[in-house]
Image (cartoon, grey):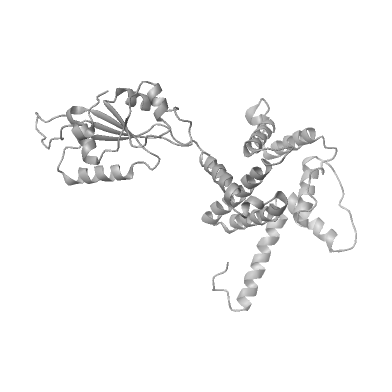
Amino acid sequence: MNATSPEAAPASGTGTGPDAAAPGRIVLLTTSHRVAPGLLSWPAWQALHAADRVLCADGAHPQLPYLREAGIGVDETSPTAEELVAACADGATVVVVATGEGEPALTDGLARLAGSGRVTMPELELLPASYDLPGARLLDLVQVMDRIRAECPWSSRQTHEGLAKYGIEEAYELVEAIEDGDRDELREELGDVLLQVVFHARIAEEHPDTPFSVDDVAGGIVTKLIHRHPHVFGDETATTPDEVKEHWLRTKAVEKRRESVTDGIPLGQPGLALASKLASRVRTAGLDVPLPTGDGMGYDLLALAVRAEASGVDPEAALRAAARAYRDAVRAAEGLADQHRP
């Protein structure tokens, strides 16, 4: 490694003729804090080993111990754009290990230099040494939730029971966003539902006897999904949604040791949804169960819900759509049809 400091390096020339020095190369190496330090891409390791100099402004950068263990000398310095360009004189390659902020001052300075036309700029390359995989921001959410649970006077006192109502509210708001077709609202409401999951998992970690974490929650659902999709992860085949659903219910019955297809259906859910779920279970199981008869609106609504489910219609969604139309008619009668509605 060349030990010359950027300040001492000769200035880059402005000439462009055949005798002009090679412009050199600057590599800005970025890493993700969500990936374990030292797990860098092969192109990154190649660039680091081939560099004439490796610089890093952050002496506490988590990558530095691993780079030095690999025999790469790193100078802890924060050069200006001019100094960095000068360090690339005579064709030198300088790798800058970017800090968590991404070196905005340095990159802005290099952009200004390039636009000035006063110097011959080295080749500039942005090289991601490690990057986020899909789902990586979930790690940020877990960390933020940990801190909120520890430091927020309200969040630190919450319990599963106290948060239960918010889970129901957020689920309904998610359904509303889906039915409205509002993409921005959908993204936000999905985040609110996800927060409920992470919040409950964080509270569960503190249980004195049977704690579990968000990793246990995720691990459990991964295992369940794989087990219930043998047509994806195993040797079985399924060509229709009904075949998939039939296997799902059969597997659940074995897992839960359920005696009836009705086991596990929450009776506290809205009535139309409950009736539809019962009808779906009966139909999927191939059972022929006559509807109970009796006097009263409840039996009429039950029959309507079963008929809707058989037709592939969600009775809850259908009723909500009709209720919205009724709401619009009411507003129109009030002369409010053209005003903004929440």
Pinpoint residue 103: horizontal percent, then vertical percent. Answer: 33, 41
Q: Nearer the viewer, residue 252 or 157?
A: 157
In the rendered image, the residue lying farthest to the top is 71
Q: Nearer the viewer, residue 162 or 233?
A: 162
Image label count: 0
Q: Is residue 299 depicted above or below 129 in this figure?
A: below
Residue 131 in sight: yes
The quadrant of the image that shows the N terminus is: top left
User: Where is residue 60, by image quadrant?
Assistant: top left
Q: Nearer the viewer, residue 144 or 206?
A: 206
Residue lying at 78% horizontally and 49% vertically, measured from the top left: 266
Pinpoint residue 232: horizontal percent, then vertical percent. Answer: 63, 30
Residue 41 in sight: no
User: Where is residue 3, by image quadrant?
Assistant: top left
Pinpoint residue 236: horizontal percent, then vertical percent. Answer: 68, 27
Pinpoint residue 136: horizontal percent, then vertical percent. Answer: 51, 38
Q: Is residue 282 depicted above or below 27 in this figure?
A: below
Q: Is residue 187 left or right of residue 278?
A: left
Q: Nearer the viewer, residue 137 or 159?
A: 159
Q: Is residue 201 left or right of residue 45?
A: right
The quadrant of the image that shows the C terminus is: bottom right
Residue lying at 11% horizontally and 35% vertically, measured from the top left: 16
